[in-house]
Amino acid sequence: MYESRIRMPALHDKVMSAADAALLIEDGMTVGMSGFTRAGEAKAVPLALVERAREQPLKISLLTGASLGNDLDKHLTEAGVLARRMPFQVDATLRKAINQGEVMFIDQHLSDTVEQMRNHQLKLPDIAVIEAVAITEEGHIVPTTSVGNSASFAIFAKQVVVEINLAHNPNLEGLHDIYIPTYRPTRTPIPLVSPGQRMGSTAIPIDPAKIAAIVITNQPDSYSTVTPPDAETQGIADHLIAFFEKEVEAGRLPKNLGPLQAGIGSIANAVMCGFINSSFEDLVMYSEVLQDCTFELIDAGKMTLASGCSITLSGRCNERVFGNLEKYKDKLVMRTQEMSNHPEIVRRLGIIGINTALEFDIYGNVNSTHVGGTKMMNGIGGSGDFARNANLAIFVTKSIAKGGAISSVVPMVSHVDHTEHDVDILVTEQGLADLRGLAPRERARVVIDNCVHPDYRDALNDYFERACAKGGHTPHLLREAVEWHLNLEEFGHMRAAG
Amino acid sequence: MYESRIRMPALHDKVMSAADAALLIEDGMTVGMSGFTRAGEAKAVPLALVERAREQPLKISLLTGASLGNDLDKHLTEAGVLARRMPFQVDATLRKAINQGEVMFIDQHLSDTVEQMRNHQLKLPDIAVIEAVAITEEGHIVPTTSVGNSASFAIFAKQVVVEINLAHNPNLEGLHDIYIPTYRPTRTPIPLVSPGQRMGSTAIPIDPAKIAAIVITNQPDSYSTVTPPDAETQGIADHLIAFFEKEVEAGRLPKNLGPLQAGIGSIANAVMCGFINSSFEDLVMYSEVLQDCTFELIDAGKMTLASGCSITLSGRCNERVFGNLEKYKDKLVMRTQEMSNHPEIVRRLGIIGINTALEFDIYGNVNSTHVGGTKMMNGIGGSGDFARNANLAIFVTKSIAKGGAISSVVPMVSHVDHTEHDVDILVTEQGLADLRGLAPRERARVVIDNCVHPDYRDALNDYFERACAKGGHTPHLLREAVEWHLNLEEFGHMRAAG
């Protein structure tokens, strides 16, 4: 059955059970696994490790591309396997352990992790566990629905475990483009000059002698949990489309806007869906994750090409895409996350980056990660890779949360992931603030006038006016600014004491 | 006299007084001027504008490379000429006007300004005023001691005023390398693969018909105000050198460390001077400003090459370098600030970036700009261009300021310019904190143990322990964290109420 998936016959005798393969992972090891936004994660070996840890406790440092599906981070956390975790996660159980200081979580720009390894600033993985659709005649690994950090993990690791997942369409082979930068000081420019360009190989080139185990699995990826657009996300999309139309008219953007990036999640997905009924044509994505919206835009004839490092779809969209892959194949490229998010490429191509903010402040600083300045939500992900070097760095969020207890626009964010230097456009369902070329006091004016929910507008105007009276380039009343966050924590409402 | 400096005879009749040239600048215009860290600024036309504004008030948006010498920002501010100013400044009078909200200051990554112009996200200059040592036979402009943003300003502006400054050594010609990226979507990789590589022309290529006026001046640049190393800066240098030696021994850095960048100012200059008595050889700089230390390292036989976008020297060093330029010429390249600071190049070359922090917090977030979270000091400058993409992002500062009233290490910085994602190493005279691969709680431990002044160590330990007890990925007690900054403002000492 699986022989056609393992095309190097010498490797057939490496096939073993997940439990046996998991024995290669020892206490204290650094383990690099495939998986990015619930797509293409190794599925059997981590669970076997969880089983084993119940009998024989062990702890590892786990590195992945981004988040894992199939509740793996939950199971690994509950089994006490995770000493350290990087560079991203979205699991509720793991999140709790991180916030209790039980798991050391290193929140990184997603293009950075393997670069830091390459320079030996992060420990190299002892072992890599990579999901694949096939192993080639040369013993090279063909990834599945994500590339993430899998290529560099496999290249750096002393041993590699491959999970051949029969549930994936073997026709995924050919989609991937594996390009690895050379070492400094003789590193050359990344040759990519257009979003669809291929630069590398379709499989991860490693010495097959490093393949220590092959495990056969047959389990689909978890579906994405993206929710359909609602009135607020439609409002955000409408403001953005109107803005883009104006920019094209003014000659500041090309007719197809240039390459688009959209962050993971429901809001960014809904915003991208907004293009379906727009007048824009020939759209192109150069993004991290390809979500439902990508394929809806392709199906609607609006998008001609999409490059990403993972494909994460809802149940509704999954069969439509993976069951008809040949229909999409010439319009897709799947890259390493180092390349999908690389600052060099983002700046060269002039990407429009659309990412979700947890909150932003009146001066345009963005918090993507920390609730109340202390509790990690998920991680910065690729938002910084894109925002810093984008042609337009756009952050979107609904103006209020928790039924109005939270204003997403605050005097001063409780944690900064993106400084005002890196934020061009802010959008809520209330409107759009164009911050380009503005000084802080001017930024505050357009943010308050355009993005704030009416319930909070007076309070923010009042804050801003009194702060300006006190003075400063970026006027603030520090004590009062933090009370917004403390009120929420202490009284369940930002304006409880207001 | 000046005919040899204006080698296109047709331009000789453009020579006029500064007052006449200044008449080309009209109220409301956007003006791009040369000048970067007190080097190579246009000197006569801005002063003529100041004179004129006394009689006939006018306001302009002034863009430069970075800071200006000869008190120009002071005079322009006092004359009320500045409506808007970007992307950097260091003048006390202008600073006051910025903090009072009288001048709108846009604080930018220094590699970003002309890119935003190229994409029409910032208004293009109506007129450029560029200091030059010569105009070539083709009518192209040879800059002086800085390139900064001069090339793109001259290319974008409708009219160009050239100040030929006879005080500069004409032998500066040949030092510059003017490379302008092509427009998207057909932009190609920046070809630079080694710090000394030349990619462009030695003069700024513009249509000479745009040269509307030429003014002859004879006034030197202001000397740099860099102060000699002291015990604390020597301590910082010693910690860094010891760290670099360890990194080389561990194989994480090459023997010559790779290209070095050092921020403007006394601390970074002193740190670089620390290399003179080190064991390191064949050092190379790929930096923004070349200060005294660069030439002391070259003279000491320690440095083989330095690339920057300006040369700013103390009185002591000035004649030694500019009076003997031929001695240094083959070891120097002067680039546009877009190229000296370009993220693509910084990441490709693997630069070690050493920049000065105003303050940093126990989790490694850095404030480079705002005193007490509100008052602008100078600006972010190039620190973000380098820190984000550096091989090693290092920030240095003395552990205390104002005789101990201020701890440079605080629970939470009052303003974030560099997030913990972008900060690898922190150094004070107390010691060095290596934050690579650490989670926030681990970062706090090494920052407090290594960088904090003994007078503040107990207070920070106490804060951190109580914050951890409360929980969170990045534990904080927000109300207490801001009190450090408010105490300073209200009582003149961070621990006044402690």
Image: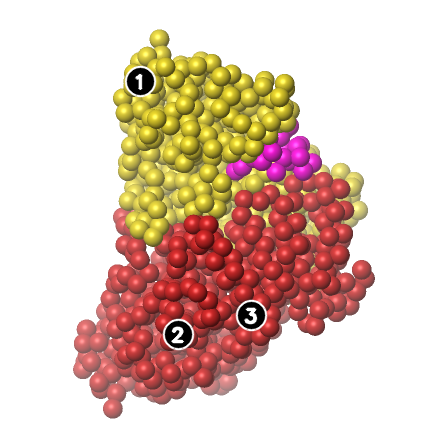
Chain colours: A yellow, B red
Q: Which residue is mark 2?
A: B300
Secondary structure category for the residue under label 3: helix
The quadrant of the image that shows the C terminus of chain B is bottom right
Name the subunit of mark 3. B
Range of magenta residues: A82-104
Q: Within 10 Å of the Cα at label 3, are there few (<14), some (14-19), or many (20+) other Cα atoms?
A: some
In the foreground, A18 or A10: A10
Name the subunit of mark 2. B
Residue A333 sits in quarter:
top left
Q: Which residue is mark 1?
A: A10
Say which residue appears at 68% left-offset and 72% top-offset: B402
Separation of marks 3 and 1 at Cα, in angstroms: 60 Å
The quadrant of the image that shows the N terminus of chain B is bottom left
Type of amino acid under label 2: Ala
Q: Which residue is mark 3?
A: B234
Position of residue A108 in the picture relative to residue B168 (left or right): right
Residue A2 sits in quarter:
top left
Say which residue appears at 45% left-offset and 71% top-offset: B276
Percent position of residue B467, x then y: 73, 46
Secondary structure category for the residue under label 2: loop
Percent position of residue B478, x then y: 72, 50
Say which residue appears at 22% left-offset and 86% top-offset: B3
Name the subunit of mark 1. A
Type of amino acid under label 1: Ala
In the foreground, B274 or A365: B274
